[in-house]
Amino acid sequence: MEHDTVDPIHQFQIHELIPLHFGSYNFSLTNSALFMLIVVALATWFLTSATASRALVPGRAQSVAELVYEFVANTLRDAAGHHGMQFFPLVFSLFTFVLTANLLGMFPYFFTVTSHLIVTFALAMLVILTVVVAGIANHGFGFFNLFVPSGVPIYLIPLVTAIEIISFLSRPVSLSVRLFANMLAGHITLKVFAGFVFTMSALGGLGILGSVLPLAMAVALTALEFLVAFLQAYVFAVLTCMYLNDALHPGH
């Protein structure tokens, strides 16, 4: 138990809660899957209950729900224009999922699903595949003009096209790693300072006195992590909107 308290990596370990195996396939319910279900249920419950009354003079919950709605809608319009609103359900769902998951992970003994690369990469691939499918559906093969910027001299087209393709393929990597790395690093740093407080407090009077500084740092980092939780959800949503703009306007 003491090792779990000090070890900063223990909080990211995935455990099977309900084993479920079919041959060589593993469908077990893990702590990661459970918290993803909790995130979806919590976000759905809040948005549904907050907007159920649809009061002319909104209460606090309805005001927050409307604020989130307008925030995402304005972000999407600014990045992709009015036609980009067709992607609003996707962007809104991604923003609320990432934000709720980030905030939920701030509570002690809770699991941060966005601190796992496989989760953030799956979200990023959903965005990129949507861009490709929607781009081809809207523009046919004209979508691939995205990789051939207008006004480029003919002799530079092969080089520029190769750079554009590499840049496009790197999008899901950068989108997923940015969110994963920020949440992982923040939680590890918090756990390290909390471990300092725990270890030094066990040394007696001088240890308790010396633990004041790491305790203050842990409190400050906790406040910072709440800000980072929102900022990373915002950055994920903004980049998603920018990428979706390519599906509507593939020309540079």
Image (cartoon, rainbow, N blue to C red):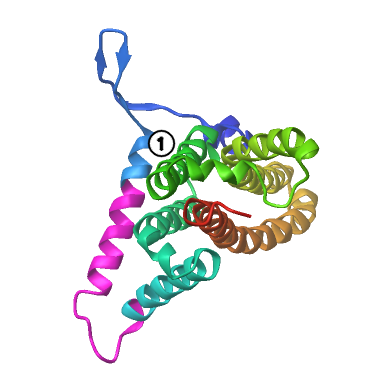
Q: Residue at x 48, y 70 (%)?
A: 77
Give the extent of the magenta segment: 38-61
Instruction: Find disc 1 in the rendering and name its residue.
Output: 32
User: Percent x, y for residue 15?
Assistant: 41, 27
Q: Main secondary structure of the magenta part?
A: helix
User: Percent x, y for residue 14?
Assistant: 45, 29
Q: Nearer the viewer, residue 125 or 200?
A: 125
User: Percent x, y for residue 108?
Assistant: 49, 50
Q: Where 119 falls versus 53 (above or below)?
A: above
Q: Nearer the viewer, residue 213 or 159?
A: 159
The secondary structure type at the circle numbered 1 is helix
Q: Nearer the viewer, residue 49 or 16?
A: 49
User: Percent x, y for residue 9?
Assistant: 60, 33
Residue 187 is a magenta residue: no
List the single residue furthest toward the bottom. Answer: 57
Q: Nearer the viewer, residue 96 or 6?
A: 96
* Three-letter residue code for mark 1: Ser
Q: Where 10 falls versus 180 (above or below)?
A: above
Q: Residue at x 73, y 45 (%)?
A: 200
Q: Residue at x 39, y 65 (%)?
A: 85
